[in-house]
């Protein structure tokens, strides 16, 4: 080993640290390295001597009182320990505040500037009806429905015509008929024959629905940025529930009908749901046997049955029912009234009414 | 010698803390004096460090080393802070050392002043305070191997200045 290689360890050797054996052996036999080691000892001694003189100077006497201890606040500790300029820290805080404010604004705008109006039709008796309208998508700018309220059937059709800021111009068509009169199904084509009223509606306000006769019905709503899927329905069907939502009818594995965004729900014993597909007729689904109905197997969102030698599958947008078996009454000759040429329609209610 | 087993005692008891102060404050002040080059500034920093330890003893973690290593570690940081914030405003006057032999003091004091600050503090803690390589690694937050190599460099620097001073040479290390 050469002196210049050993000298890197000479300092450690002087401090009593472990060094490689060959470095120690070289130092033991090298006069030059021994001289350097001696030099370390001399400067070290001089340094310690100088240090001892400085350390020997007494420090001022102080009294340390326990009661004088201050509870330093957390923010004071932070200020004391801060390793970056305080102005930079202040700017950082300001930036965070600005960024979080922008996030909050973005969230608010997403809701306030949403193009979907979630309407709620609330009768004085009975449950509210959801009606979601898009003001930017003409395929989803209207909703139609038929529901029983008290002893009456309420037909309604609401369409978003125009959006102006936070308000929207609605086309509202309603008709009330006593139960037992009028059609049991209802579709957009039928709705067009109902009297129309146009009203400006601003979410946050309550609008009494016109032309509801003795029925008291109010309209409320709010803006959102998307059409909620399934109207917040739970995936798991409730007791006695039969649900049709965004349904496809398959006939021998071929799509025979598409009910689009139409939906119908029933949840009481003795009730059922029905749908009409042009060319295929009407289908009534019931949990209890109906004269002339065929049994159907329910598997989650599929209802499978055979009718007139054809294999049908009702493919639903959500699980149909808790029951594993339903009854399907298929009427191929059915024609909707008053417009036999109307498109697909859907309905729900007591079986006696549907039949 | 202050034992770390007494840490809890000095944190609670004013008298025990006074003993800790009397034993370590002169050493800390001497160390800071080499670091900042001013007796008055070293005195102020020493008092601040002990006041801070008294008001917030939880800042010392016995698991990380001895109380003396902690004090020198804090002192090193405070000296660095002082250099950053006050160096331009505070001209260093003639250092006062009552009781020192002026001739001996001036030779080593002059030599130390020419050693770079980090090498100077490292040498001081090793030679004067007898800090181990492991303790120095904690104080400077560097690996032990780096302590060894930096001490070698520091000794070589001081040696060159020391020998040069003996020959009457001017020496500047940057």
Image (spheres, coloured by chain):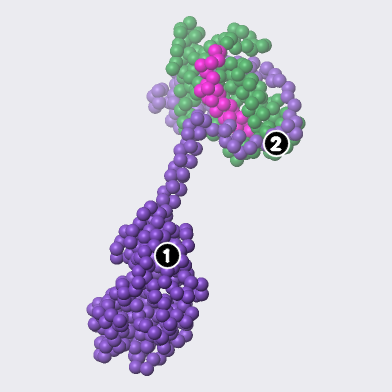
Chain colours: A purple, B green
Residue at mark 2: B11
Q: Chain of mark 1?
A: A
Assess whether residue A99 is covered by the magenta stretch: no
Residue at image position (68%, 32%) is B54
Q: In which image quadrant can residue A305 be found?
A: bottom left
Q: Is disc 2 in the same subunit as disc 1?
A: no
Q: In which image quadrant can residue A47 be found?
A: top right
In the rendered image, residue A249, in percent from the top left (x then y), is placed at 29, 79
Residue A184, visible in the rendered structure: yes
In the rendered image, residue B44, in percent from the top left (x then y), is placed at 63, 21
In the rendered image, residue A210, in percent from the top left (x then y), is placed at 42, 69
Q: Secondary structure at mark 1?
A: strand
Q: Nearer the viewer, residue A151 or A9?
A: A151
From which residue to which does the magenta span run? B67-92
Residue at mark 1: A119
Query: How many numbered badges does the structure rendering display?
Result: 2
Q: Chain of mark 2?
A: B
Quadrant for the N terminus of chain B in the image: top right
Q: Is the magenta region chiefly helix, strand or loop?
A: helix
Q: Give the label on residue A145, or none.
A: none
Q: Nearer the viewer, residue A21 or A351?
A: A351
Q: Is residue A213 above or below residue B122?
A: below
In the rendered image, residue B113, in percent from the top left (x then y), is placed at 52, 15
Residue at image position (71%, 20%) is A60
Residue at image position (64%, 20%) is B43
Q: Secondary structure at mark 2?
A: helix
Q: Nearer the viewer, residue A75 or A338?
A: A338
Give the Cα distance between marks 2 and 1.
67 Å
Residue A324, visible in the rendered structure: no
């Amino acid at each position: 080993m050469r002196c210049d290689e050993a000298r890197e360890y000479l300092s450690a050797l002087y401090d009593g640290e472990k060094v490689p054996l060959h470095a120690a052996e070289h130092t033991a036999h090298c006069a030059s390295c021994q001289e350097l080691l001696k030099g370390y000892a001399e400067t070290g001694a001089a340094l310690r001597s100088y240090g001892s003189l400085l350390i020997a100077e007494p420090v001022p006497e102080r009294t340390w009182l326990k009661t004088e201890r201050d509870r330093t606040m957390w923010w004071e500790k932070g200020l004391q320990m801060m390793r970056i300029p305080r102005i930079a820290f202040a700017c950082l805080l300001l930036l965070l505040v600005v960024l979080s404010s922008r996030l909050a604004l973005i969230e608010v705008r997403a809701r306030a500037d949403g193009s979907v109006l979630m309407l709620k039709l609330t009768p004085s008796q009975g449950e509210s009806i959801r009606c979601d309208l898009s003001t930017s998508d003409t395929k989803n700018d209207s909703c139609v429905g038929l529901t029983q309220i008290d002893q009456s059937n309420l037909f309604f059709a609401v369409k978003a015509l125009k959006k102006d800021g936070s308000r929207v111009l609605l086309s509202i068509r309603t008709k009330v008929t006593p139960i037992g009169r009028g059609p049991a199904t209802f579709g957009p084509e039928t709705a067009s024959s109902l009297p129309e009223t146009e009203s400006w509606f601003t979410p946050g306000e309550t609008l009494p629905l016109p032309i509801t006769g003795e029925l008291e019905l109010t309209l409320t709503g709010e803006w959102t940025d998307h059409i909620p899927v399934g109207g917040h329905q739970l995936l798991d069907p409730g007791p006695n529930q039969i649900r049709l939502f965004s349904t496809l009818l398959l006939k021998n594995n071929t799509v025979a009908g598409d009910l689009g965004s139409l939906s119908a729900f029933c949840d009481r014993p003795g009730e059922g749901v029905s749908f009409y597909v042009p060319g295929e007729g009407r289908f009534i689904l019931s949990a209890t046997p109906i004269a002339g109905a065929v049994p159907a197997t329910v598997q989650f969102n599929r209802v499978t049955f055979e009718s007139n030698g054809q294999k049908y599958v009702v493919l639903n947008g959500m699980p149909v029912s808790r029951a594993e078996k339903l009854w399907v009454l298929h009427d191929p000759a059915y024609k909707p009234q008053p417009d036999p040429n109307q498109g697909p329609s859907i309905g729900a209610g007591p079986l006696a009414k549907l039949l | 010698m202050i034992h770390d087993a007494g840490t809890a005692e000095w944190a609670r008891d004013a008298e025990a803390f006074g003993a800790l102060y009397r034993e370590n404050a002169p050493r800390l002040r001497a160390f800071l004096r080499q670091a900042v080059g001013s007796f008055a500034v070293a005195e102020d920093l020493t008092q601040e460090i002990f006041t801070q330890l008294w008001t917030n003893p939880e800042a010392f973690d016995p698991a990380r080393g001895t109380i003396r290593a902690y004090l020198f570690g804090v002192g090193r940081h405070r000296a660095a802070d002082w250099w950053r914030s006050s160096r331009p405003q505070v001209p260093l006057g003639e250092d006062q050392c009552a009781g020192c032999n002026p001739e001996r003091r001036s030779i080593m004091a002059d030599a130390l002043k020419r050693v770079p600050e980090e090498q100077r503090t490292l040498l001081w803690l090793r030679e004067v305070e007898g800090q181990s390589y492991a303790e120095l690694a904690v104080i400077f937050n560097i690996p032990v191997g780096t302590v060894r190599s930096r001490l070698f460099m520091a000794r070589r620097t001081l040696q060159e200045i020391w020998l040069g001073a003996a020959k009457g040479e001017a020496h500047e290390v940057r």
